[in-house]
Image (tube, helix red, strand yellow):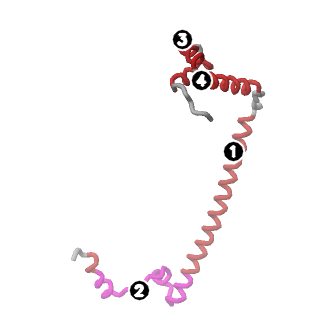
Amino acid sequence: MSKKRYDVKLEKLLYRSFDEPLSDGDRKKLETALAENNALKQEAKRIERMRSLLTDTAGGQFDPLFADRVLFRLREKEDDFLIVLLWSFRRIALVGVATIALLMVNNIITGGDLSVDSVLGLPQLTLEETLSFNHLFEGE
């Protein structure tokens, strides 16, 4: 595309002239600029061709229920996504519960008794061991 040789204000004025009526002063300024500047005149012709091509193309209309159908399909897709997400969560949750149950059974077998500490895999601390950790909680 060739380099523009006209003012940006004139270009805006040209575009505005296609969409709304101009004041007398603006119209005269634009007519003078179009008569003096070939690049601006070519831009005006290009805009006219583009606008005529756009007007000649058939302006498609959507069916009256088009928006409702689109929204219905979007809601269906959203529901499908939520179902898949819930199904995936259930699978992951089931695997997690099974893993926790296996760890608890392992802790019971290796611990040798059914105490809470053994089931949770906590070490059985004596009173002396508990008091030896006392310095960790005091501010030294």
Q: Is residue 92 magenta?
A: no
- Which numbered disc flags the more N-terminal residue, 2 or 4? 4
| Residue annotated with mark 4 | 40
At mark 2, the secondary structure is loop
Q: Is mark 3 in CB contact (under 8 Å) with mark 2?
A: no
Location of residue 88 in the rendering, given as x and y in whole percent from the top left corner: 65, 63
Q: Residue at x 57, y 33 (%)?
A: 3
| Residue annotated with mark 1 | 74
| Residue annotated with mark 3 | 23
Location of residue 29 in the rendering, given as x and y in whole percent from the top left corner: 53, 14
The amino acid type found where label 4 is placed reads Leu
Closer mark to the observer between disc 2 and disc 1: 1
Is 18 left, or right, of 129 in this rendering? right
Q: Which secondary structure dominates the residues rendered in magenta?
A: helix
Answer above or below: position of 101 versus 13: below
Q: Residue at x 77, y 28 (%)?
A: 57
Please state the extent of the stretch shown in magenta in the rendering.
104-133
Say which mark, if any, is on residue 109: none
Q: CA distance from mark 2 to mark 1?
A: 57 Å
Q: CA distance from mark 3 to mark 2?
A: 93 Å
